[in-house]
Image (cartoon, rainbow, N blue to C red):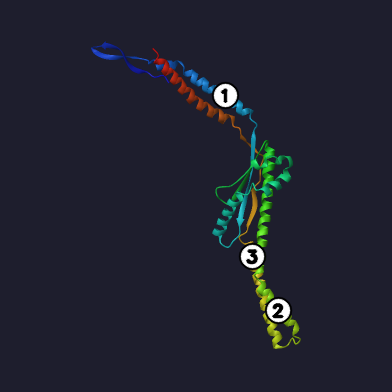
Amino acid sequence: MVDTEQRPTDVQSFNGERRWSTSRSPASSTLGRRWWIVLLGALAIGAATYVVSKAIPATYSSSSTIAVNVTGTDANDATLGANNYASQYAQLIGATPVLNAAGQTLGRDASGLSAAITGGTVGGQNLVSIRASGDSPQQAQVRAAAVTDAFIKYMDRQTLAQGRAFEKNAIAGLTPLNSDITHLSKELAQIHDQTSSHYQTVETSLTNVLTQRTTQLSTIATTAASGEPTLSVINQAGVGSETAPRPSLYALAAFIVALLIVGRAVVYFASRESVRP
């Protein structure tokens, strides 16, 4: 940090040659004498930052991971569907019904739960991460576990309700077949001669219509089940780890910043002193 420069303050002769003499500039000399101010000032600020950050209450974090799977005949479609569902589900981690259900399990640990929960996907894949923070390792863990359980139950109820709604609408489309079955059943009951060709014709028609309805009901059930997501926990919430504060990191950052600021200040004032008459 100490610089020297050629200054034309004196000209000497050596073996017939003219040479400039070398001397320190006033600014460099002043800065050289005060370099320790820069270092001590930065160290003091870094130490103060460390002490202050150590006094801040610690925050702990725990997380769990849920896998979203979709069944289907096409593997690519199933994978794409699972990834899409995971992206949507990550936005629902903090939904009111989920937090309310988790809060009933947590009791006192539910205070401030909304701000302590975050959700997201892992690498844009079919994995949903649920992260909870707390004032202790145990609080972070129980929060993450409670929200995970409440979320899975909530989504299962939603999936079941959607499946039932689909089946209800699909079954409503079977009304013509049901009408035919009712009509043919009544007509068949009114024919007393079960050996007649008319009886056999009506009976065959009724059998065909019943078979059609059974086939369609099976298709509806298969369609309702296919493509619906299933959730499973692949990583249980563990004991929380400390995430903040980080005194050593904060102190290092403060030391570097202070080193730059105090260094610039010393250079500035040293330069001003060097130009004073």
Which residue in the protein does label 2 denote?
183
Q: Amino acid at mark 3?
A: Thr
Q: Mark 3 or 2, which is nearer the eye?
A: 2
Q: Position of residue 76 (x, y in %)?
A: 54, 58
Locate residue 142, reporting x and y percent. Answer: 69, 42
Q: Nearer the viewer, residue 127 or 157?
A: 157
Q: Is residue 46 left or right of residue 239?
A: left
SS label for mark 1: helix
Q: Which mark is residue 204?
A: none
Closer to the N terminus: mark 1 or mark 2?
A: 1
Residue under label 1, please give it: 47
Residue at 62 percent across and 64 percent down: it is 223
Amino acid type of the residue tagged 2 in the rendering:
His
229 in relation to 238, above or below = below
Confirm whether residue 161 shows in the render. Answer: yes
Q: Are marks 3 and 1 in contact (CB under 8 Å)?
A: no
How many marks the image carries: the answer is 3
Residue at image mark 3: 222
The residue nearer to you, when weighing 171 against 72, is 171
* The residue positioned farthest toward the left in the image shown: 16
Q: Residue 268, image x and y in percent?
A: 44, 20
- Disc with the residue nearer the chain's start (3 vs 1): 1
